[in-house]
Image (cartoon, grey):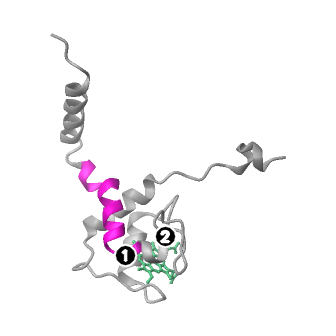
Amino acid sequence: MMIGRWPFIVLFALAANAVGGGALAADGSAEKGKIAYVKHGCWQCHGFAAQGGIAGPKLAPDPMPLVALTSFVRNTRGAMPPYQDAILSNADLADIHAWLASLPKATDFRSIPLLNP
Ligand code: HEC
């Protein structure tokens, strides 16, 4: 009987997660982070692609470490409103951080022929 590659990929992912002691969850999920980023309104100031917006600076690519991001979001007293734990959980923040970290860097303009006459 012919079995596709799927079952093996799923098994491998489950095994890796078990061996890692749930490390995947602790590291945050980029997919959930994208949703949390929109749900909590970060996009209103930082842009939908976290590229920076009218009110807030760019957050990606190369976001600050999760500890620094969490500390900033919880304690900011500047132009950005602070988010308490009850509104935005540490798990949501870890997810948002994972999403920010997953965003690709912009293409180097030198590699685009049209921009290099
Ligand atoms: C009302 C507008 C607004 C919203 C909504 C907002 N921010 Fe901000 N954010 C700002 C501004 C303005 C700054 C710069 C403030 C400063 O440096 O004191 C900032 C700074 C930051 C920084 C520091 C960036 C750096 O390089 O110093 C992080 C991280 C951040 N925001 C994350 C978030 C996240 C995550 C959310 C959603 C949960 C969010 N922000 C929602 C306006 C906003």
Q: The disc labelled 1 sits on which kind of residue?
A: Gly
Spatial CA distance of label 2 from label 1 is 10 Å
**Which residue is at 29% across, 58% downward?**
32
Q: Is residue 27 magenta?
A: yes
The quadrant in which residue 54 appears is bottom right
Q: Nearer the viewer, residue 19 or 31?
A: 31
* 57 lies above or below 13: below
Quadrant where the N terminus lies?
top left
The answer as to whether callout 1 falls within 8 Å of ligand 1 is: yes
Give the vertical position of 18 relative to 88 (above or below): above
Image spot of residue 11 (x, y percent): 19, 30
Q: Position of residue 107 (x, y in %)?
A: 63, 49
Q: Earlier in the sequence, mark 2 or mark 1?
A: 1
State the SS at label 2: loop
Give the residues drawn in magenta, as a range.
Answer: 23-42
Residue 34 located left or right of residue 109: left
Residue 28: tell me if it is visible. Answer: no
Q: Quadrant of residue 92?
A: bottom left
Q: Is residue 39 above or below residue 4?
A: below
Q: Position of residue 77 (x, y in %)?
A: 43, 89
Q: Residue at x 51, y 51 (%)?
A: 104
Query: Cβ(mark 2) to ligand 1 < 8 Å?
Result: no
The residue that label 1 is drawn on is 41
Amino acid type, callout 2 = Gly
| Residue at the farthest right position | 117
- SS type, badge 1: loop
Give the quadrant of residue 44. Answer: bottom left
Q: Which mark is residue 47?
A: 2
Name the residue nearer the viewer: 78 or 57. 57
17 displayed left or right of 61: left
